[in-house]
Image (tube, coloured by chain):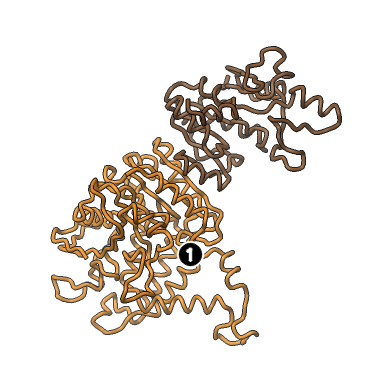
Chain colours: A brown, B orange
């Protein structure tokens, strides 16, 4: 791997987990794809052809520069551009917390994709709990924003997300909870700062 | 100018025994002949895409902000071809040309031409220029329909299709606007059923109205409000029917200008070409089935203030391409310019096109 590839994986530890769960050549759709870094990585690591969905102008132009297929539509208004089960996997990488219509977007993911991969910063991590206990909104590596400038609207914990999956009748196929890029097996909702899930319909 | 002796069979069944295509090129075709980009023009433009002539420095090409050395479509890297469509009044064979059968201008007898016919003629021009395969075909509006049709008529001869401010077919509302424009021309007493060239007159009143109507649909309401507001030319209402508002003055000016240089028979045929275009028609209206034979990679761009061909029309194309698992990127740019935004220099739009062309391998 190139030095920049290593830096990327250090910055986004969920990328490696996502790649590892994908079959080679899987067709992927990345919602809120930013500059297309994940899609580029998946193309290099898994020969997975993909498309990104992104609303921000600068990010869309960055995708075009990075030679990543990008579709400038608002994922909040649904994925009507995409037919049922037209993708092997639909990914929502560290975007869940910024989504407004959470249930709608998650349902759409499993309409369009055979499976969904979702990663998000775990609000249940002890440092967040401690900061709240001390009377402050949490700011950390995984949640780097002050409360007044955060783009995030829906924080959740590992336990919360699993509750939502149950109510949406999503089946959790795999779960990986990480802290500083390393898997956390003991008390994941307390000791993990980043959670990655692979889900299918029941 | 390129002359072609082999007849061109048209979609209507008619045949042009021979024809000319006016074209301009910019840059140099590389040794591998892999850097050619065809630029397709829209309703009132021509093959004069970029730059200006020494003899006429004021006549700058219609897409000069995009095409040229160091511009997003960089003519130091690409060999750019601008070609004037058949039926035009800017050099290619059209209604004002001489009909070899009669020795007089074709006039009303010039056949109705279609987007498919234009692509056929452009393919002949490509053969003549030694271009086996275009690196890209790009166009906006009516030009975008040609860029799309290239991928269907000649899937092997186009690597990238750049489709801007497009629709894969007109809505009845679009057709309605075109019909009003045609009626304006055809009911002008100077139209003479299309044979006005012999009579030494031009149906300027009809053309003027057609252009005024067109202009209303090319601008967004917002752009119009911003540009003209409710400003009164004379400061106070005149309580007469002379020009009161700035927008009236603008439309009259545009109409007058257009009627001095554009041909009425050409206008009728172009609007028909727009109306008839519908690649899905042969597939029961199923655009996905219609686009199945396309092989090119696509960049589709729409503008949110464009109400002539609004973003949902572009999304239909994108959706059909996705269903066919084609390579496609789609930009929906929040620009106020309306349908004409594709001609303007929006920094995001041009940055995206620059990046797209830069990534295009030769």
Q: Position of residue B161 (x, y in %)?
A: 36, 48
Which of these two is toward me, A7 or B41? A7
Q: Quarter of the image for the C terminus of chain B: give it.
A: top left
Q: Nearer the viewer, residue B124 or B188?
A: B124
For image coordinates 44% across by 51% down, the residue present is B353
Front-lying residue, B58 or B123: B58
Where is residue B39 shown, x and y percent of the image? 34, 57
- Classify residue B200 as left or right of residue A47: left
Q: Is residue A15 above or below residue B335?
A: above
**Residue A202 vs residue A63: left or right?**
right
Tag 1, which chain? B
Residue furthest out toward the top = A186
Element at label 1: helix
Q: Residues within 10 Å of mark 1 (few under 14, many from 20)?
A: some
**Residue that carries the numbered disc 1 in the rendered image:** B218
Q: Residue at x 34, y 39 (%)?
A: B292
């Amino acid at each position: 791997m190139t030095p920049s590839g290593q830096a990327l994986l250090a910055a986004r530890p969920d990328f490696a987990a996502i790649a590892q769960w994908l079959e080679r050549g899987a067709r992927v759709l990345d919602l809120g794809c930013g500059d297309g870094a994940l899609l580029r990585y998946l193309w290099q690591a898994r020969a997975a052809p993909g498309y990104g969905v992104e609303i921000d102008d600068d990010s869309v132009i960055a995708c075009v520069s990075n030679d990543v297929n990008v579709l400038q539509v608002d994922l909040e208004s649904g994925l009507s551009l995409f037919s049922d089960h037209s993708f092997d996997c639909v990914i929502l990488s560290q975007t869940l917390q910024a989504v407004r219509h959470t249930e709608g977007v998650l349902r759409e993911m499993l309409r369009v994709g055979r499976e969904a991969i979702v990663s998000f910063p775990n609000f249940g991590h002890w440092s967040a709990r401690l900061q709240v206990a001390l009377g402050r909104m949490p700011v950390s590596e995984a949640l780097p924003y002050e409360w007044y400038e955060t783009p995030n609207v829906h924080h959740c914990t590992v336990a919360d997300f699993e509750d939502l999956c149950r109510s949406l009748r999503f089946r959790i196929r795999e779960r990986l909870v990480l802290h500083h890029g390393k898997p956390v097996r003991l008390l994941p909702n307390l000791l993990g700062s980043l959670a990655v899930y692979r889900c299918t319909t029941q | 100018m390129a002359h072609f002796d082999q007849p061109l069979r048209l979609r209507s069944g008619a045949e042009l025994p021979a024809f000319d295509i006016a074209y301009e090129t910019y840059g140099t075709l590389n040794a591998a002949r892999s850097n050619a980009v065809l630029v397709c023009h829209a309703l009132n433009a021509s093959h004069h895409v970029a730059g200006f002539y020494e003899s006429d420095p004021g006549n700058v090409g219609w897409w000069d902000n995009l095409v040229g050395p160091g511009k997003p479509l960089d003519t130091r890297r690409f060999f750019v071809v601008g070609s004037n469509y058949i039926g035009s009044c800017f050099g290619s064979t059209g209604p004002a040309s001489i009909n070899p059968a009669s020795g007089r201008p074709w006039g009303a007898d010039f056949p109705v031409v279609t987007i498919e016919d234009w692509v056929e003629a452009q393919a002949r021009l490509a053969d003549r220029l030694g271009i086996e395969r275009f690196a890209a075909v790009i166009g906006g509006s009516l030009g975008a329909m040609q860029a799309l049709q290239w991928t269907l008529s000649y899937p092997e001869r186009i690597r990238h299709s750049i489709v801007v401010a497009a629709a894969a077919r007109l809505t009845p509302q679009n057709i309605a606007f075109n019909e009003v424009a045609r009626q304006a021309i055809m009911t002008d007493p100077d139209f003479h059923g299309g044979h006005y060239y012999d009579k030494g007159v031009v149906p300027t009143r009809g053309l003027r109205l057609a252009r005024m109507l067109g202009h209303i649909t090319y601008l967004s309401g917002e752009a119009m409000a911003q540009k003209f507001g409710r400003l009164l030319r004379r400061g106070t209402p005149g309580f007469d029917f002379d020009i009161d508002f700035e927008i009236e003055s603008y439309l009259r000016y545009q109409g007058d200008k257009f009627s001095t240089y554009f041909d009425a028979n050409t206008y009728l045929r172009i609007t028909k070409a727009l109306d008839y275009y519908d690649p899905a028609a042969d597939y029961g209206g199923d655009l996905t089935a219609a686009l199945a034979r396309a092989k090119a990679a696509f960049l589709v761009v729409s503008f949110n203030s464009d109400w002539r061909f609004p973003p949902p029309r572009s999304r239909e194309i994108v959706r059909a391409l996705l269903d066919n698992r084609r390579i496609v990127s789609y930009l929906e740019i929040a620009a106020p310019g309306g349908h004409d935004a594709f001609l303007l220099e929006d920094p995001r739009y041009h940055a995206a096109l620059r990046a797209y062309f830069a990534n295009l391998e030769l």
